[in-house]
Image (cartoon, rainbow, N blue to C red):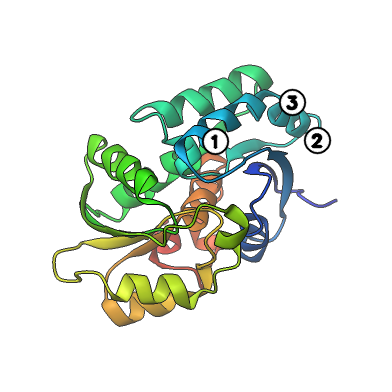
Amino acid sequence: MYGWRMRIGLMVPASNTTIESELWRMVPSGVSVHTARMLLGKVNEEDLIKMEEHVETAARELANADVDIIAFGCTTGSLVKGKGYDEQISDKIASITGIPAVTTSTAVLDALHSLDVKKVGVVTPYIDELNKLEKAFLKANGINVVEIKGLELLDNIDIGKQEPYIPYKLVKSLTMAECDGFFISCTNFRSIEIIEMLEGEIKKPVISSNQATLAAILKKGGINLTAVSGYGSLFRRA
């Protein structure tokens, strides 16, 4: 049986073409990923808020697969209404299904705190509207955003087409000296294969939305993070 150790229920924007592949590459033995999709138009504030309308249906579909934990796999979709919105979403999922839940933005905060990153450089594929919302969310949760750079992409399919060298170059273009660590934002922004490379070169922690999401899932499910290797210092925390 797949998922004999843990079955992950994953809620994703319907146009996301990255997070499933990245999670399957990273999950330890005995952990499986099962997905439900939520309709999303453009990657902007209005459409991300509308996406919440599909949370209940997606949650019930995943519960039908008898998953052990449900992850809301969207970064800006879980912070678009500001501080506390991430917890509102996870509480809503848990109340509907009776299954523990976590959101990507909650997972990112946990990852930043666990790596003692208080001053972060952020790279995203987003439009400026969303970068401002993300910066405000991080600041409200005690994280100082030293610098944030985005690609101004509005179409999620276009985001999913970006090659890993794009976030790599974006991170390397940031002001290194002033940052404790770096965050590659967006569950549709392919980047897990460059995390170790970046950390080796800049000697500071690097997290991504998908890496942080998996770490939060494993911690919530009682699986030691060291069961995952090759995807950054976050997983070297027992």
Displayed quadrant of residue 27: bottom right
Residue 195 makes an appearance in the image: no
Alpha carbon distance from label 1 to label 3: 22 Å
* Rendered residue at 39%/66% (across/down): 233
Residue 65: image tag: 2
Farthest residue toward the right? Answer: 1
Instruction: Tell me the amino acid under the disc marked 1.
Output: Asp
List x then y, in percent, for residue 139.
Answer: 23, 40
Q: Secondary structure at mark 1?
A: helix
- In primary-sequence order, the first of circles 3 and 2 is 3
Q: Nearer the viewer, residue 138 or 39?
A: 39
Residue bearing mark 1: 47
Q: Residues within 10 Å of mark 2 (few under 14, many from 20)?
A: few
Q: Secondary structure at mark 3?
A: helix
* Rendered residue at 45%/42% (across/down): 76
Residue bearing mark 3: 60
List x then y, in percent, for residue 41.
Answer: 61, 41
